[in-house]
Image (spheres, coloured by chain):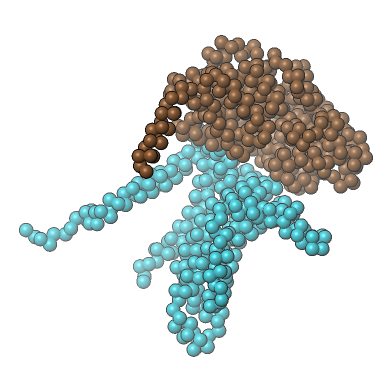
Chain colours: A cyan, B brown
Amino acid sequence: MDKAQRPNQLLRNLSAKIAAIPMILTASVVFAGGTVWTVVYSFTDSKLLPRERWVGFDQYERLWSTNRWLISIENLMIYGALSLIFSLVIGFVLAALLDQKIRFEDTFRTIFLYPFALSFIVTGLVWQWILNPEFGIQSIVRGLGWDSFTFDPLFNADIVIYGILIAGLWQGTGLIMVLMLAGLRGIDEDIWKAARVDGIPVWKTYGFIIIPMMRPVFITTLVLIAAGIVKLYDLVVAQTSGGPGIASEVPAKYVYDAMFTKQNLAQGFAGSTMMLLSVLIVLIPWAYLEFGGKKRV
Amino acid sequence: MRIRTMLLASAAFLVTGAAQATDLEVTHWWTSGGEAAAVAEFAKAFDATGNKWIDGAIAGSGGTARPIMISRITGGDPMGATQFNHGRQAEELVEAGLMQDLTEVAERENWAEVVHPKSLLDSCTFEGRIYCVPVNIHSWQWIWLSHKAYADAGVAVPTNWDEFVAAAPKLREAGKIPLAMGNQSWQSNGAFGVMLVALGGIDLWTKVNVDKDAEAAGGPEMAKVFQAAAQAREFSEGSNVQDWNQATNLVITGQAGAQIMGDWAQGEFQVAGQTAGEDYSCLPGLGVHEIISTGGDAFYFPKLDDAEKTAAQLELASVMLSKETQVAFNLKKGSLPVRGDVDLQAANDCMKKGLEILASGAILPDGNQVLSPDTLGQIDDLMVEFWKDTSITAEDAQARYAAIIADAD
């Protein structure tokens, strides 16, 4: 009798909800389910095949007493911190330079973005050759007359991770630059005019007006860079395969090797659980700040 | 247009339907020139039985290939047959009942009698049943010496490890690397294993690797081996290559004095047109203890539902171990046959040395046969770190080695 009955919440936007079911299932079963399964089996002594023989925290104890894992973590932190800083700085500076209405902007943009079209394996191989002392940069500079010039990061255990960083930046900054450029173009011309009228120097305009306005773009690039850091694997495999010695090992490679070449699934699961944990430690405070604080607006 | 496609499709269907032979996909990681030629011998022999060998070569060495093979078997997409190394790599797959039982063929053809050394068949046996076919023997215990490098340095070619150590400074003076060494972990570990057997002796090796005696692994006998390894580490400084064959190439071209590497290195010398005894020498057991390990390759046959394919699998197993195939295959591969009753006339000097040692019975099992992949992997990691980082002393490395052996399963 009452026509204005409240519509059933469940049936609202029914078609959209049906369309979302496959993705919801994938997310809950494949992502969440797979994650839980991995964590649970990291407490077993599974070798080649998973089995339920519980050993408590043994796998984690072994993990944290393994030198190779510790070196992997250290490498990831160095690579992560530097790649975050340099990607953002170089990406932003390149974007700001391209934004000066220069000639041949399209050409430069294409050149800078082009490495991103290559896979990490190709990037790694290219840089393996460039950094090889026998026919890369070192031999070219020596050929020009500087006979004692030495530049062989991939063969020096102390600096090998920087050799990988160079390749990673070469590949990744192009994309960051393009995103930043899009962000800069999204800033209204009038803001620049207003700043100029007020006599604010250009660097201050960038630092205090433009960059705060580009916050969404920065967050997007941050997520992209962070994801690239955690999954760092193929670049190392192609460039050094972890060497010299174990100086350029990374956690993802440790996990892969434990699971597939050492036939020790549980050890690999323990490693991947630690990787997940470290991502969560970074992600949860950020999500809390980002979404938890929304109410005050 | 559509009619033509349909015709083509039906023609293709008829052709495949007409073929009576059973197709069997065989996966392996033999992709270099000599290896591929050796595999072709298997394929030829199998095709001659009226079946068809579908080659499933996976490039990029065993470390890359094995995960692919294992995930295909455990993922429910098994191939007809697959290569593994002798030993424990497929142990759990057998335990899980994923592999075809070959005991029937083995008994009919009396494998227990013909396979020599017997340890190879033992590695294939699980609870009294046989699950794999050993096809060849590869031994690690060799050092390859470049005559050119020693001639350039003006010293005689060493005939044992001590002479090699004594000659090393001369080689350095002549601007050569005394010991070529690839940067991959399995190579460092392999070379260390060779030194352990050659310098520590077979008793020590057995105590550490078979009995997993951590005390022996941390003891004074072992300390000598680690000291020698630390010395070898100095000799290998400057060989910035990754793959084993690049390191072998340093020896072939005379840039390096020697390389500790398994007998598969021989193929590289052959391809380069060098003659054993003239251009290069080989010393089994570093010229100290003439012992060889009997690692190598074996074929496993995953269980299939198709009865015809199962029959073809058993046929292939029998073909691989037949006398003719063994000779043809191993000559191309440069490895030793697993049968004691075949004659290898065409073998070269180094292979003949190996055959003699094999016949004399101075043999030991391969690391893959006695240690699990997990333990081997940990030792690999330790060795490659030790080999590349001179700040790790022999004592530290030994302590860590003993800890791994104590935990070994």
Q: Can residue A74 be seen in this view?
A: no
Q: What residue is at 64 percent from the left and 34 percent from the top?
A: B376
Whether residue A28 sits left or right of residue B276 in the image: it is left
Residue A247 image position (x, y, % from top left): 67, 49
Is the residue B295 above or below the residue A88 in the image?
above
- Quadrant assignment for the C terminus of chain B: top right
Residue B11 image offset from top left, x and y in percent: 41, 32
Number of callouts: 0
In the rendering, at what x and y percent does residue B230 appear?
Answer: 79, 40
At 91% from the left and 35% from the top, the residue drawn is B156
Quadrant where the N terminus of chain B is found in the figure: top left
Of residues A117 and B391, which is closer to you in this image?
Answer: A117
Q: Is residue B324 above or below residue A66?
A: above
| Outermost residue toward the left in this view | A1
The answer to which quarter of the image holds residue A257 is top right
Q: In which quarter of the image is residue A136?
A: bottom right
A18 vs B22, left or right, is: left
Q: Residue at coordinates 56% horizontally, 76% vertically from top-left?
A: A103
Q: From the top left corner, tell me how far across and down residue B212 is, in percent.
A: 67, 28
A80, A55: nearer the viewer:
A80
Residue B205 can be seen in this image: yes
